[in-house]
Image: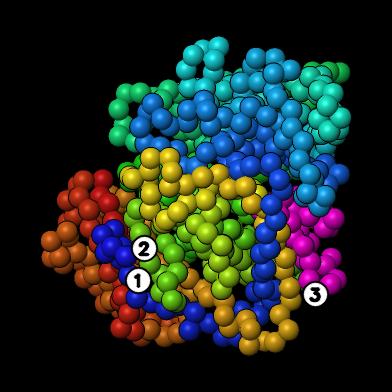
Amino acid sequence: MSLKGYILLCCCFHWFLSFNTIAQQFPYKIHLDSIRIPELGGIQSYAFGQWEGKWLIVGGRLDGLHRRQPWAAFDSAGHNNQLIVVDPVAKKKWSAPTTFLSSSVREQLSSTNMEFKQVDSLLFLIGGYGYSPSLQDHITFPYLTVIDLSKTIDSIIKGEYDALAFNQIKDENFAVTGGKLAYMDSVYYLIGGHRFDGRYNPMGHETFVQTYTNAVLTFDLTENKEDWELKILKKMVDEQLLHRRDMNVLPHLMPNGEESLQIFSGVFQPEANLPYLSTVTIKKDTIYQEPFFAQYYNNYHCASLALYDQSKQQTHSIFFGGIAQYYDSSGYLVQDNEVPFVQTIGRVTRNSAGELSEYAFPIKMPDYLGAGSEFFVNPLLTKTKNGLINLNAIESDTILLGYIYGGIKSSAANIFWVNDGTQSEASEWIYPVVITKYNAPEELLNEQSNNSLQLQVYPNPIENDFVVSYYLQLESDINITVKDLMGQPILQKSFKKENPGYVKHVLNGKGFKTNEVYYLYFEINGKTISQKLWVH
């Protein structure tokens, strides 16, 4: 493995955890099986809904990671121009071409990275990026399309296509791709994302126009006969917290039972092509960053699900593979600023005190797999009002949570700069995900926490003062050093015998040069963690 771009973070976190702490968190182990449905094929970054045990798959890409050349990236050959129905139990597949739909609906439904949400038997689709034959250009589509799942799935199976099951609204607010659509307390939330028009290239050449929404847009939809009426309710804008896309967003329950939505990580920071490590909470009228927490694993959109344990007042968010800036290697956390494909299955848990912590399961994804995949929750499971799987309603020791399907399967961790279209593909495999209760307490010790320390440096990029925060399990000696690229110390601080618990230090960065890169070295009990810093 090349040393370029890699920094070994020499801190093995899970030794600090007691058995009782882990056992109270998530007393289940995860199993992945695999099935393949003939002629289904692979797909990634698509939208879906499910009804009466069958899936409807819409849009997405049939190829792997997009290439970096403008003429090759997101080409028309990779569009999914079919509506696909899947029965994962009977292992059957049906499909229909989208040619029976109007041009505007057809074009949008061949796009990638649409925002989507199912509410009852209706699937709501917003935006998406792709080629528009009518405009002869790549655009982000300014539409919201509503699909009646029951009618559509039934008509595709019968081979009798029903265009009346599709309704569309045009609104420039919906020209968004790479964001998320959520539904909470009868209100729709369009979260983050960006508008991207033109041909992609990674060098910033003038082949496209890109605008991040930096916002959460709430709206209401009312069905009026065969049409839908749109009412924009509120737009919450935050250029720091919401300048992100391709993130995971899951429904969440606070320890007091309050509903919220949780933004996990996402890309890209305005001053650096790196993921966010922060987590953002969305409530009815507010958004805020979760303090004292950094998400190191699963920074990019991947198959994910949320579970709730009411008896312990805990919410668990689980993520399957994808792309991340960090990964675990033999108990050590490794930072790779190339942001590679990873095999990590991660979990973020909010405990009864409201604190967030992150763990890596001992089991990993079978390949560099997960980016652009989706999780189909077992429809037989009991869920909370806002869609979390209710763990307290599970009576058996083993239960099928659902299925992972599709996503990008990469042949190696880092392929972007060598990608000629052969290094990755859209996965055709379906992975049933089963959880089983632990039989023996010692089995739990295999699960690792990446952040009993929970080191976070913010803001980053920094201007003047900046904060270094962390969580100590034990009384510890701490040394903080900031060095320039030549290895010369710029700032040094030592803190002896700090007490266990959350710690926050405000440090002064006025001596740093603007537009420069530095490294912060955090030493704890003889082990060192590094963090890259940017200065405005």
- Amino acid bearing label 3: Asp
Q: Which residue is mark 2?
A: 335
> Residue 82 vs residue 465: left or right?
right
Q: Tag 2 or tag 3, which sits nearer the N-term?
A: 2
Q: Residue at x 35, y 71 (%)?
A: 9
Q: Tag 3 or tag 1, which sits nearer the N-term?
A: 1
Residue 229 in view here: no
215 in magenta: no
- What residue range appears in magenta? 375-404
Q: Residue at x 35, y 23 (%)?
A: 207
The residue carrying pointer 3 sits among few (fewer than 14), some (14 to 19) or many (20 or more) residues within 10 Å by Cα, namely few
Colour option used: rainbow
Q: Residue at x 62, y 38 (%)?
A: 46
Q: Which residue is mark 3?
A: 397
Q: Which residue is mark 1?
A: 9
Q: How far apart are the two marked residues, 1 and 3, measured between alpha carbons?
A: 37 Å
